[in-house]
Amino acid sequence: MTLQNRVDPFGQIVATPARGTFYGNRGGCFHDNNQQLTRARWASRQWIVCVLQFKGRHREPLMQPGLYTELFFLDEATALAAGHRPCFECRRADAKRFFEALLAGIPGLVAEGDKLRVDTVDRRLHDERVDTRTKAKRTTLAVLSDLPDGAMVALPAHSSRAFLKLETKLLPWSFEGYGAPVSPPASSAVTVLTPPTTVAALRAGYSPTIHASATR
């Protein structure tokens, strides 16, 4: 049975046989004893993206009763667009780079001398990624040339399709990988799927892992 556990850049969770290269969760369990999602789409504000393997851990079957709901992503750029951030356990070095980029990219994020806390970031991301009342994804508007590499966007003519910004091009996203790039004008207005806090980290130098199909 194909489980409903693959996440797209809009944050939607769907069932597809396509496989992901990253793994994560949304802070707990929101599936039932029949491996079906409940009406909820998260259990807490702690939305993380993890590596597929860590210290030999392997959980089978997935979506076990009462345990956290496992999710999968094409790549890290997809997970970031959906509103996740690097895990501090299995991806500690990446998480530290992400938090350092946040401090560099968002002046005044914390008071001088204070430490940036995980809960501070999780609260910001949760406010930016989803309307907690309607569960609809929050987005922002921007000019394409103002966005850093690794951000995900939608175009006015293709509002339901995600594109990865990479240098001067946009690569159409799918669960299987990226398609042939397109080159809209740099002045194009786009809908930004990646939360503003994460965009700031990307702009300050955080480089997410991108699926190999993006470089073909």
Image (cartoon, helix red, strand yellow):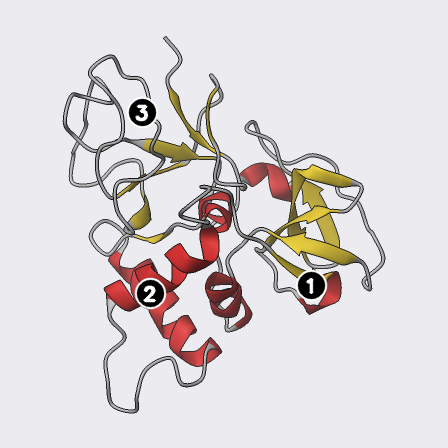
Residue under numbered circle 1:
142
Of the numbered discs 1 and 2, the one sitting upstream in the chain is 2
Residue 95 image-quadrant placement: bottom left
Query: Type of residue at label 2?
Result: Val
Task: Give the image location of residue 63, x and y in percent.
Answer: 24, 23
Quadrant assignment for the C terminus: top right
Quadrant assignment for the N terminus: top left
Query: Type of residue at label 1?
Result: Ala
Which mark lies nearer to you, 2 or 3?
3
Residue 39 image-quadrant placement: top left
Task: Give the image location of residue 208, x and y in percent.
Answer: 47, 55
Badge number at residue 121: 2
Q: Residue furthest front?
A: 133
Question: How far apart in space, not on screen, are marks 2 and 3 (Cα)?
Answer: 26 Å
Query: Please, what secondary structure does the residue beneath circle 2 have?
Result: helix
Label 1 neighbour load within 10 Å: few <14, some 14-19, many 20+: some
Label 2 neighbour load within 10 Å: few <14, some 14-19, many 20+: some
Of the numbered discs 2 and 3, the one sitting upstream in the chain is 3
Residue under numbered circle 3:
38
Task: Give the image location of residue 70, x and y in percent.
Answer: 29, 31
Task: Give the image location of residue 120, x and y in percent.
Answer: 29, 68
Query: Please, what secondary structure does the residue beneath circle 3 have?
Result: loop
Badge number at residue 85: none
Could you tell whether 19 is left or right of 53 in the image?
right
Could you tell whether 140 is left or right of 104 in the image?
right
Do tag 2 and tag 3 residues touch (Cβ < 8 Å)?
no
Query: Type of residue at label 3?
Result: Thr
In percent of the image, x 80 and y 41: which residue is there?
Answer: 157
Label 3 neighbour load within 10 Å: few <14, some 14-19, many 20+: few
In percent of the image, x 16 and y 33: which residue is there?
Answer: 57
Query: Please, what secondary structure does the residue beneath circle 1 have?
Result: strand
Residue 146 image-quadrant placement: bottom right
